[in-house]
């Protein structure tokens, strides 16, 4: 129920140097697809971020910072023995790690 608080918490951990690896999930993809459309002005983007994330009035100037953070999220993270992903990876494809369209949804 507190998307804004969660994102601020995660960004704060990263800013303090913690090894936090946030991934792009299906909800981030849906929001970013809308916010990245050519017809979406900065004003509309700010309004949508405020609505979607319920940004408190005294922090609405941080919307663009959050937009950049969400845009920077990778689709997967690779460890020595594992690949971490929000949804899944289709290993039946020739290039499974390039299938960003389906990865957050599988």
Image (cartoon, helix red, strand yellow):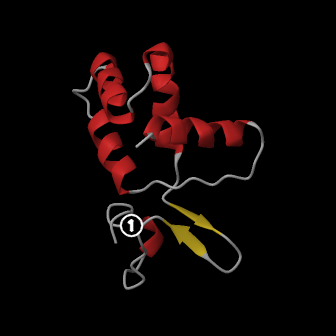
Q: Is residue 58 above or below residue 27?
A: above
Q: Is residue 48 above or below residue 85?
A: above
- Name the quarter where the C terminus is drawn: bottom left
Front residue of this view, candidates 15 and 42: 15
Seen at 52% across and 48% down, the residue is: 73
Is residue 104 visible in the rendered structure shown here? yes
Q: Is residue 26 above or below residue 80?
A: above
Seen at 67% across and 80% down, the residue is: 81
Q: Position of residue 26 (x, y in %)?
A: 35, 56
Q: Position of residue 63 (x, y in %)?
A: 45, 24
* Residue hosting label 1: 103
User: Is label 1 in a helix, a strand or a loop?
Assistant: loop
Q: Position of residue 23 (x, y in %)?
A: 52, 56
Is residue 36 visible in the rendered structure shown here? no
Front residue of this view, candidates 17 and 97: 17
Front residue of this view, candidates 69 and 62: 62
The furthest residue to the right:
17
Label 1 neighbour load within 10 Å: few <14, some 14-19, many 20+: many
Q: How many marks?
A: 1
């Amino acid at each position: 129920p507190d998307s804004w608080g969660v994102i601020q918490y995660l960004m704060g951990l990263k800013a303090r140097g913690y090894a936090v690896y946030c991934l792009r999930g299906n909800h981030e993809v849906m929001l970013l697809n809308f916010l990245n459309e050519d017809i979406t002005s900065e004003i509309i983007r700010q309004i949508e971020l405020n609505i979607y994330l319920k940004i408190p009035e005294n922090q609405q100037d941080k919307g663009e910072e959050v937009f950049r953070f969400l845009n920077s999220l990778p689709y997967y993270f690779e460890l020595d023995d594992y690949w971490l992903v929000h949804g899944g990876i289709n290993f039946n494809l020739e290039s499974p790690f390039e299938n960003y369209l389906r990865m957050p949804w599988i």
